[in-house]
Amino acid sequence: MRHIPKFSDPNLLVGPSTEDDAAVYQISDDLALIQTVDFFPPIVDDPYDFGEIAAANAFSDVYAMGGNPILALNILGFPAKLSKEDVLGKIIQGGVAKATEAGVLIVGGHTVDDNEPKYGMSVTGIIKPGFEITNSGAQPGDVLVLTKPIGTGILTTASKFKKVNKKFLDQAVVTMKQLNDSASKAMSKVGVNACVDVTGFGLLGHLFKMLSASEVDAIVEFDKIPILEGVVEIADRNILPGGTKRNFESIQPYVKWDTTLTNAKKFIMCDAQTSGGLLISVPKDKLDEILIELKELGVETKAIVGEIAVRKSPEHPEIQIIKSASN
């Protein structure tokens, strides 16, 4: 992004400066477009599941901003020599199924010959100007609510080496295929200060982006973080994605770790997620209201994982990790 010249446009409500989930461009007093794109190689063996996960992941950036995705374009890399195989069709069918569930129209796309399959979407969403939820509004005293368990990166990596219980992997697939639409509706109805979706930079990486944009710090309780079954045991065996390790290294200077946490648990907090949940910064006086809304809309995970604090250092945010507030 550093190679893109800085620019100013009064209609660009959210641009690259805050490293937000998507861009927001105002069209009229009542309409703004949300624009995002995401694609990646397969993380599961079943091509239909991969298509669904990739689509849900692509829509998530729009949901994180409180918007409604309406249109999508397929982005697909696939080996031409295998184009007659049913795998390609199943990937697209999975994407179509998830788009249909989300009420999104797939209106075209582009395919290239690629030795390694890759799939995702460019997505257009809509929102009323001024109602977009960004990563830059978190306030001291806010409560952090997470709407999906973490650990998908560790589980899918273990699957590649045949070192994961199928039951655990199936649970990860289910959560990755879940849309963040209900969580988005809940936070938009209640009114929150900030939100990010938890994907490739992991829980702490995306929280750090929120803290940087909002100029605040955070305290996170490890024992309150929802973790998928089997993840801790796999991390203890040092089966970790490369992205998770890179996330851990990059966040290290900004984290004050609880001394009782093992390295495995630290890595879990940095695990590179695919189609993770929303991390929402909620004013404390609205916490009960959003928890009720999330429950009524069928959101299974609604974990209170920490709180926003006043910035200590003028140079950078700090994330303090405690095991439990009761300690």
Image: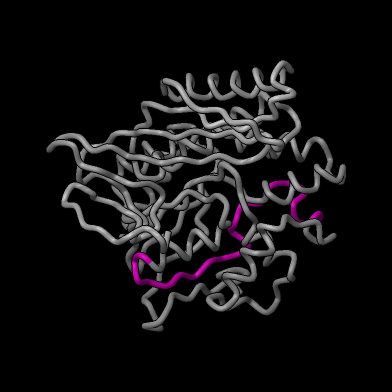
Residue nearest the observer in this picture, 90 or 202: 90
User: In which image quadrant can residue 93 be found?
Assistant: top right
Looking at the picture, tell me which residue is in the foreground, 127 or 14: 14
Kindly identify the residue that appears in the image at 48 percent across and 19 percent down. 100
Which residue is painted at 25% across and 43% down in the image? 25
Quadrant the N terminus occupies: bottom left
**Of 160 and 283, which appears nearest the observer?**
160
Q: Can the viewer see residue 292?
A: no
Q: Is residue 47 magenta?
A: no
In the image, taking residue 29 as reference, residue 302 lies left or right, namely: right
Q: Residue 138 vs residue 58: left or right? A: left
Q: Residue at x 66, y 57 (%)?
A: 243
Q: Residue at x 64, y 24 (%)?
A: 91
In the displayed structure image, the side of residue 220 where residue 314 appears, left or right = left
Is residue 62 something that shows in the picture?
yes
Residue placed furthest toward the left: 29
- In the rendered view, tell whether residue 128 sits above or below residue 101: below
User: Which region is colored magenta?
Assistant: 213-234
Q: Position of residue 316 (x, y in %)?
A: 43, 78
Quadrant of residue 35 in the image? top left
Q: Is residue 143 above or below residue 172?
A: below
Q: Is residue 232 magenta?
A: yes
Quarter placement of the C terminus:
bottom right
Residue 143's image quarter? Answer: bottom left
Q: Give residue 149's position: percent from left, percent from top.
A: 61, 47
Percent across and percent down for residue 172 are: 68, 39
**Residue 4 percent location from the top left of the image:** 37, 58
